[in-house]
Structures are given as C-alpha cells and as structure tokens.
Image: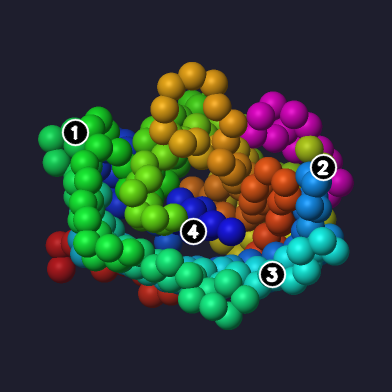
Amino acid sequence: MRLSRATACLILSASGASAAEPVPLASHRAVYDLSLAQSGGTRAVESARGRIVIDFSGDACKGYTMQTRQVTVLESGETGSRISDLRNTTFESADGRSYRFKVSTLLNGTPGQSVDGTAETVADALKVRLKEPKRDGFQASGEVLFPTVHMRRLIAAAREGRTTLSVKVYDGTDDGRKVYDTLAVIGRPATTASVKEGAPQEGAVGEVAAKPKADRDKPLREGEMAGMTHWPVTLSYFTAGEGERTPIYVLTFDLYENGVSGNLRLDYGEFAVAGNLSRLDKLPAATDCKS
C-alpha cells in the first residue's frame, strides 16, 4: 500500500503558485486513525485499521521537512492478515527546486524495497539521482512539481476559484523512477463553522455528500481551525502517458488553506480506507525570513 507524499503534505511565499498572495503552510503534527471505507473485487478486504502520523515543519526561508509513517493492517479471508509499515522522510527547498527523499517499507515484518535519492528541477526538466534500490539516475522533460510546491499550487488555485488543476508530480515513492500525472478537482469553499450540523455539503466532483460524522476530525472543529476556509478536493494519480486511463489511486480530502487536511479517504481501487484526524498539534511558527 502506498501513501503519496502529496497526501502527506495535506498538511511560502509562493514561487510558482500565486505571487500576489503567499501560501503559508502550518508546521504541525497530525495523527489519522484508519478504518475500512469500502471493499470489493475478487479478494475483498474484510477489515482495515491503522494510523498515519505526519510531522511537517519548515518555513519559506530554509525549506520544508516532513516525516510520515503509515501502518496499515488489512484482513482478508482469502489472503489472511497483511501488515504494512511505510516510513518516508523528505526535505524540499524553499524555492521548490531541490528535493531529498528516503522511503522504507516493512511487509509482515519483512523489509521491502528502500528508496533513497535526490532530485532537482532545472530548465523545464526533472533530474533524479538514486542511491537505492540501486545507483541510478534519470531525467524527465517538462514542468514537474515536488509535493510541497504542488500543495501550494493547489491552495492557490482554490483561492482563485479554479475547479481543476492538472500537473505532473514527483515524490520519490514506489521505485523512485515514476513521475505521475495528477488531476485535482476542487469544490466550493466552506468553513467548519458555516456548515450546519446534518446539512449536506457539495463534494469536490459536484455531488452532494453527507456531512462528516460529528465525532470525526474533532481537532478541525476547535479553535482557529473551525473558522478556517477549506475546499473539498478529489486528487487522482495516473501513470504518465497519453489517452484515457484509470487512476492508480484517488485521494479525497478537505484541504484547509494552511495545508492541514481532514475528511481523508484513500481509494486503491479494490478497497478504500478512511482517515479520521484524531490529533493535531501546532508546531512553532515559521521564522521571519528577514531575521
């Protein structure tokens, strides 16, 4: 099971985003409790549980660091129990041009493939150098965004009232050699305080969806988060290529304007898991670039 670095960013002075209005991202620690949302296919998942923990910190001067861990336990009558443990550490420069990443996985306690490398964007091209799984490198032409720049671009698009954003993204996951085509569909802005209990809320794809349960994402209904603008987003990841394609996976979430995310759902095709934000800790604010 794969957790995209962009999901983890859900969570700068905008270079490539919106020069007129900066997109600051909040340093924070978020804990999401996972549960099975949907299952189907020939080898149906009968239950799922787990947790995602995200530590995001940094500023528009020194760049952004994120540590992510996702532990998921899937139960199936046909395949038995499967425990995956994914750990991801990244650093992205403040200007969004360089990126360091390290990913490790355990499956039922057995180490899986590790990915370790660096990437940079130069003159409308992406250059990647890998240390693991083997020393290698590759290039991709055209504009490719790293995850934090992608999230800033997405927030800027939402602020401007745009309903879609289609860009290429590189996050270093899987084998470290994949660039993804992404399509984000953005719904209407709202605040938690403005949504009446039990009232329907328009989804990111224009459908009417039920308001999240009252006990879900409780930290987002308290303090400054309760009055903060957010947008429902459906973010699809595709293998790079031409023509009509089926997404590798689809993320749906409420994107808050400080980068925090709620109402999380990760759809892998044959099954989907929901993430309930059970804890949100605010970390020290970003430093002043002038100091």
Task: Count the labels in the image.
Answer: 4
Q: Are marks 1 and 3 in contact (CB under 8 Å)?
A: no
Q: Residue at x 64, y 34 (%)?
A: 204
Task: Say the numbered circle drawn on residue 210.
Answer: 2
Q: Nearer the viewer, mark 1 or mark 2?
A: 1
Q: Residue at x 38, y 74 (%)?
A: 284
C-alpha span from label 1 to label 2: 42 Å
Q: Are marks 4 and 3 in contact (CB under 8 Å)?
A: no
- Which comes sooner in the sequence, label 2 or label 4? 4
Q: Residue at x 54, y 50 (%)?
A: 256
Quadrant of the frame with the N terminus: bottom right
Q: Give the range drawn in magenta.
A: 196-208
Q: Are marks 2 and 4 in contact (CB under 8 Å)?
A: no
> Where residue 95 appears, x then y in whole percent?
21, 50
Nearer-the-camera pick, 194 or 167? 167
Task: Say the numbered circle drawn on residue 124.
Answer: 1
- Which comes sooner in the sequence, label 4 or label 3? 4
Please, what is the three-letter code of the amino acid marked with disc 2? Ala
Q: Mark 4 points at which residue?
A: 8
Q: Can the viewer see residue 231 in this picture?
A: no
On the picture, is 79 further left or further right than 279? right
C-alpha span from label 2 to label 4: 25 Å
> Where residue 206 appears, x then y in whole percent?
69, 26
Please, what is the three-letter code of the amino acid marked with disc 4? Ala
> On screen, 151 above or below 221?
above
Task: Say the numbered circle drawn on residue 82.
Answer: 3
Nearer-the-camera pick, 12 or 117? 117
Outermost residue on the top side: it is 243
Please, what is the three-letter code of the amino acid marked with disc 1? Asp
C-alpha span from label 1 to label 4: 25 Å
Please, what is the three-letter code of the amino acid marked with disc 3? Arg
**257 in magenta:** no
